[in-house]
Image: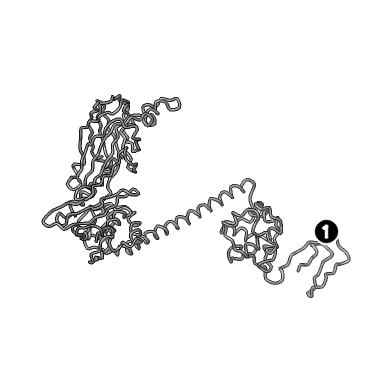
Amino acid sequence: MSSRKALPGGEAQVVASASGAEPCLSDSGSESAWEEVEEDPEGPALQARCLFCDRCFSSPEDVFCHCSSDHRFSIETMVRKHGLDFYGYIKLVNFIRMEKPTLECLTSTSAPAPWEGEEYLKPVLEDDPLLQYDIEDVTDCTNTSYPYGLIESSSLLERLKCAEHRAELAEAALARAQEDLHKMKQFAQDFVMNAEVRSNSAASAIADLQENEEDVYFSSYGHYGIHEEMIKIILDVGCGTGILSMFAAKAGAKKVIGVDQSDIIYQAMDIIRLNGLDDTISLIKGRIEEVDLPAEKVDIIISEWMGYFLLFESMLDSVIYARNKYLGKGGSETKVQKGWQYCCSCLATSITTTETSGQSFLKVYPDICSISLVAVGDLNKHADRLAFWDDVYGFNMSCMKKAVIPEAVVDVSDSSTLLSESCVIKWIDCNVVSASELEFSSEFTLTVMKTSLCTAIAGYFDIYFEKNCNQKVLFSTSPCSARTHWKQTLFFLENPIHVGKGEELKGKITIHKNRKDPRSLIITLSVKDVKQTYSLQ
């Protein structure tokens, strides 16, 4: 209720009766002398509730400010974006209160808007102050409170605060995710491997091997006419996803131990469990030189250790260490009845044994490896690699060749570009080779098959499964064989060399490890009085 009272000096007044009767005007006075004075309304003031939470405020303006600062929602933006009139605004408010959409849903909404239905004209809250608010004031309230020129800056500041808030939430979520991942890894390791802490190596958690004392033979061996017995223990060095370990288990191994330093071993645990082989295969995370195995000796070592140019990454050193420490020298003679097969970039094995007494055998597979060189004449690759720098969009950058040439290139060489017969520069017997023998020098002779320009010397390797194998198997990365992910290693010559058919291209190659990075190799190549040092890293 309101009443009118005369201004000072006025002659008339309006008096409201307590009963609410119409006020009476005096006979005199001027209309200009009157002023409206608001009294406190009857009853408590209406409370404006937030659109997204249960907080209440004294005015719609306060609600809108709260929604903007706490919920990152601007009613002004929505009104302007969708061109809402008074009824559209009412529908929007009721829609939010009724459907409780997420902020992302609201801000990404496009025509037709989901609140256009007539059902949203019905108030969700009785006497909702937001529905009594003038739509024009929605946009005015944000503009009138800022001096000219500060509106955009304030908006930018608000966006920056919002971005900072999201960043803090993201960091917290990332920390929780990392903690959860760590817990999951530990759980997986404990679940799959039944890990126990060993007294002499607290960091080495391994699975207890459940021995199956029954002689169970792999079904494919039913046709063999020889006496077969289970191989006791196989060690897989650098097991990765566990593919070789699983092949060994399927082939009849009673126990398989896989070791790998990388986190891929956690996926290997899942893979092995999914294939029901966790009672046969146990996995250990760590370097073979540092972990403790659940067995003093093993019967066979398997490993896919080969790197580019065979020796890149020096993983053969780890196999040699494992061989010297864990491989038993007595017992049964190993027969690789079906050999190893290359399938989907992995080596598979089928292994059986025959009893042999009084004999001593070393068993590392693959057992024999070779590194070979061949002359290549590929002017296109040479141009892409080196001649390119002679004219780079009209500029001479030939000085870049000095930086490019020393880098050995891992790439596929087309067999049609080969100019010579291949020449083996190194044979390696994995059962007896020492780590020091992996650094060497070798002279070579390449017999040229056709007259051309030699642009590079390509290196590749072959591996063999020979000793004690009923069927010998060769796996080659030669340019003349099926392509593999090892490809070939190319040593480009700065200036192509002319060679003639029947000519013997003589040279020398020296290979040693990079002392600063033992994984990488330093290769020095001399051919036809041209000497160049390359790095493979």
Side (left or right) of 496 relative to 17: left
Asked if residue 283 shows in the view, the reply is: no
To which residue does mark 1 refer? 32
Vertical side of 453 occupied by 51: above or below:
below
Tag 1 secondary structure: helix
Q: Which residue does the image show at 40% across and 28% down from the upper left?
A: 388
Q: Quadrant of the N terminus?
A: bottom right
Q: Position of residue 124 (x, y in %)?
A: 66, 67
Q: Residues within 10 Å of mark 1 (few under 14, many from 20)?
A: few
Q: Nearer the viewer, residue 165 or 535?
A: 535
Q: Which residue does the image show at 56% across and 59% down from the upper left?
A: 70
Vertical side of 531 occupied by 520: above or below:
below
Q: Position of residue 182 (x, y in %)?
A: 37, 59
Q: Nearer the viewer, residue 139 or 106?
A: 106
What residue type is disc 1 on? Answer: Ser
Q: Nearer the viewer, residue 354 or 270?
A: 354
Q: Quadrant of residue 256?
A: bottom left
Q: Quadrant of the C terminus?
A: top left
Q: Quadrant of residue 279?
A: bottom left
Q: Position of residue 335 (x, y in %)?
A: 20, 53
